[in-house]
Amino acid sequence: MLTGMGETILYHWLLVGLACALLFGIARPFFRRRKLQRVRFDGGLLRHELLFSALTLGASAATIGVLWGVLRRSGQMSFAEGPAAWWMVVGEFAVYFLAFDLYFYLLHRLMHTDLVFRWVHRTHHRSMAPNPLTAFSFNPLEGMLTGGFLPVFLAVFEVHRESLALIGGFQPLMSLYVHSGHEVFPRWWYRSPWTGWLQTPYFHDQHHARVGWNYGGFTTLWDRAFGTVSPGLLESFESRPWTEPELSPVLAAPRPG
Ligand SMILES: [Zn+2]
Ligand SMILES: [Zn+2]
């Protein structure tokens, strides 16, 4: 159900992903020191994450495809005409970035209520030490709710096609980044007002390890506003030794926050 535009976006982000994988391969010693949690290989977990990643990617793509088709055909989704200046692309991307961030924060808080966690979100939290596969391992219903945001956003905000190349595919890539299990940024990151608003993998890694804190998708803004930043995050981030971590003990199954 991919359109020409959809294919361009897919190739664009595939290229970005490939470049990241290449960088990871070249700078392996650096990334080994920057690993956040070292856990034993778990075949059951791998099968779980492979299965739910496939189901979720399928459910998410189908939701986007169906909503896209319905909204385009009914004339509720259209794109701004004419070439877009760079500042328009930046502005439109910023609106999407902030809108999705708030949507994800609220949805994620809902996912951590007792019943919804048990029946839906627990699938994602099987991994207490996230890895890139965890980025897509969700209950398909959650994949539909997350994926459906893009066409609805495009129906509400008319953006240029150039902006779509940046907006489409950004969320999955950001999910891969926060679930990478490796931290690449310096100790002062969360102390500085210039950078501390943007999430790094450590922030979401703590969401999986401690459960009940750090619900944000892209930024730390809503967690700060609602007081859900994990206690001691700043201190633990600054005092990390950045040497290869010890093997973590097997952890108990997570509970909702
Ligand atoms: Zn969660
Ligand atoms: Zn996660």
Image (cartoon, helix red, strand yellow):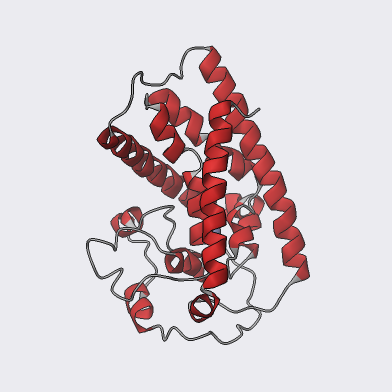
Give the quarter of the image for residue 63.
top right
x then y, percent, for residue 70: 57, 18
x then y, percent, for residue 130: 58, 66
State left or right for residue 182 relative to residue 231: right
Q: Identify whether 70 is placed above or below 39.
A: above
Residue farthest toward the top in the current orientation of the protein: 74
The quarter of the image holding the N terminus is top right
State left or right for residue 153 relative to residue 195: right
- The answer to whether residue 2 is visible is yes
x then y, percent, for residue 110: 49, 48
Q: Identify whether 187 is placed above or below 56.
A: below
Is 245 in front, or is 32?
32
Q: Identify whether 238 is placed above or below 201.
A: below
Give the quarter of the image for residue 184.
bottom left
x then y, percent, for residue 253: 64, 69
Residue drawn at point x = 32 percent, y = 35 percent:
89
Q: Identify whether 242 is placed above or below 216.
A: below
- The answer to whether residue 180 is visible is no
Residue drawn at point x = 48 percent, y = 34 percent:
150
Is 232 in front, or is 172?
172
Q: How many marks?
A: 0
State left or right for residue 10 relative to residue 223: right
State left or right for residue 126 relative to residue 238: right
Residue drawn at point x = 30 percent, y = 39 percent:
90
